[in-house]
Amino acid sequence: MNTSVMIAALPELLGAVLLTLKLVALALLVGVVLALPTALARLSHILALRWAATAYVFFFRGTPLLVQIFLIYYGLSQFDAVRTSIAWVVLKEPFWCALIALALNTGAYTAEVFRGGILSVPHNQIEAARAIGMSPVTAFRRVIWPQAIRQALPAYGNEIILMVKASSLASTVTLMDITGVARTLASDTYMPIEIYTTAALIYLCLTYAMAQVIHLFERRMDVTRVRT
Amino acid sequence: MIRNLYAAAALALLSAQGAYALDIRIATEGAYPPFNLVDANGQLKGFDVDIANALCAEMQANCTIVAQAWDGIIPGLKAGKYDAIIASMSITDERKEAVDFTAPYYAAGAALVAPTQSDITFTLEGLSGKTIGVQRATTYAALLKDEFPGANVMTYDTVDNQNLDLKAGRLDGVVAQQVVMYDWLQQEGGDAFAFKGDPVIDPQYIGTGAGIAVNKGNTELLAAFDAALAAIKANGTYARINASYFPFSIAPQ
């Protein structure tokens, strides 16, 4: 292992951290916004809503993220109708294509995480909430959601870490994220072990930091813990 | 008499060596038409593959040709997954530090292709501010980086993907190997695009041409390839393969 190559590669690789973080943060944000209505629609009594949400989750959870990125980036650009539409302003850019794919993907997974959290709230609590006169919205906001989010947090933390790693696929559509820079450096230097090890260490730092933040939230939300 | 005996013995030894068929594993990329590609039946074909087969026939060797992704093709050779690379790999000093090369088996320049109506030129000012596609880890990527610093370069895993984006209108142009782009221009939809300016033939970037790469120190295989290459050039096999692909010669000078 040639450590001088690793050190020389570090500035360029660290420069790419910002793009990776931007992709992950925005994808997670959009993903949560998509996930909550999807989870509720999955639990809805209205058949059309349930059906639409199930189809969305089925597709984006059931197909590889790489295929989704290629479909959005290379697939959509094949249609003249897309290229002449206003959507092309967004779809022309590899960043937005990768972000759309990542967000739709994490949205589907997160919806399932939220659904699991909501289902974990005992039904008699909901009945009790309704019995004391809470509206369905109030019951959801004050009884179901606070407990659901606590139940879902460990699984959601997992999803955040998965997203950091999944963002590496953005390098396949010309983006110079950590993996994109690493691939270019590796092929310039012919030292793939050194370069990819450095990239892996950077990813480890990122996922470790995120795991710590999630852990902090878990502790803060743990009502059984004695506060000091 | 004695001399004749020696000659006979040497001949016997030589033909015995000839009968002992060498097993050679060769890697190509399979995504660089018309030099190497995978056809509809999943078979590898193209100029590189034809040359590989002609060389193997000349050497009377048993060859297996496998497809290997470009950015892992030298690491794969070093790891011993195959014995040689015949994949349109340009001979460069940088690569020579990692592998040994035969004499070049073809040479082609780096060309700029852009939409026909575009007024882009293949100059420092012409590419400045333009979005140019190129394949990752190629000499063309190095050319853009060093000589055209004003260009906004997008790197692709394959030339296919790079050309898809040219067609999609995400790129103002692409810089790639002249012959590869010549082939692409012949295909459906290629008539909307054209070569712009003269190709770069500076050996600093296009090298002395494409060579066959073997592991460092594998002199025996290297010599066998070089001898076979000279043989197929001399007996017309090379010219026949060349003519079946291009209306011009790509034999290195």
Image (spheres, rainbow, N blue to C red):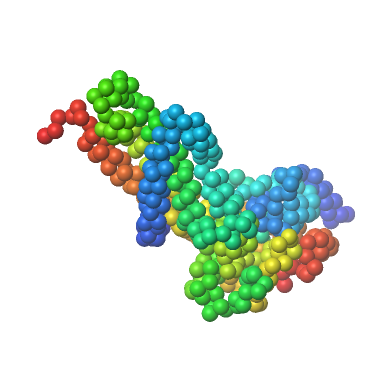
Residue B85 appears left or right of A24: right
Residue B125 appears left or right of B239: left
Residue B215 appears left or right of B37: left
Is residue A13 in sight in this rendering?
Answer: no
User: In the depicted view, which residue is nearer to us: B73 or A172?
Assistant: A172
Residue A220 appears left or right of A158: left
Locate the N terminus of chain B by quadrant: bottom right
Locate the C terminus of chain B by quadrant: bottom right
Residue at 50 percent across and 30 percent down: it is A47
Residue at 45 percent across and 51 percent down: it is A99
Q: Position of residue A76 (x, y in %)?
A: 58, 53
User: In the depicted view, which residue is nearer to us: A58 or A167?
Assistant: A58
Q: Position of residue B89 (x, y in %)?
A: 63, 60
Q: Position of residue A220 (x, y in %)?
A: 21, 36
Q: Quadrant of residue B252?
A: bottom right
Q: Quadrant of residue A150?
A: top left
Residue at 55 percent across and 67 percent down: it is B132
- Taking A154 as reference, is B215 above or below it? below
Q: Position of residue A157 (x, y in %)?
A: 34, 38
Q: Quadrant of residue A121?
A: top left
Is residue B54 in sight in this rendering?
Answer: yes
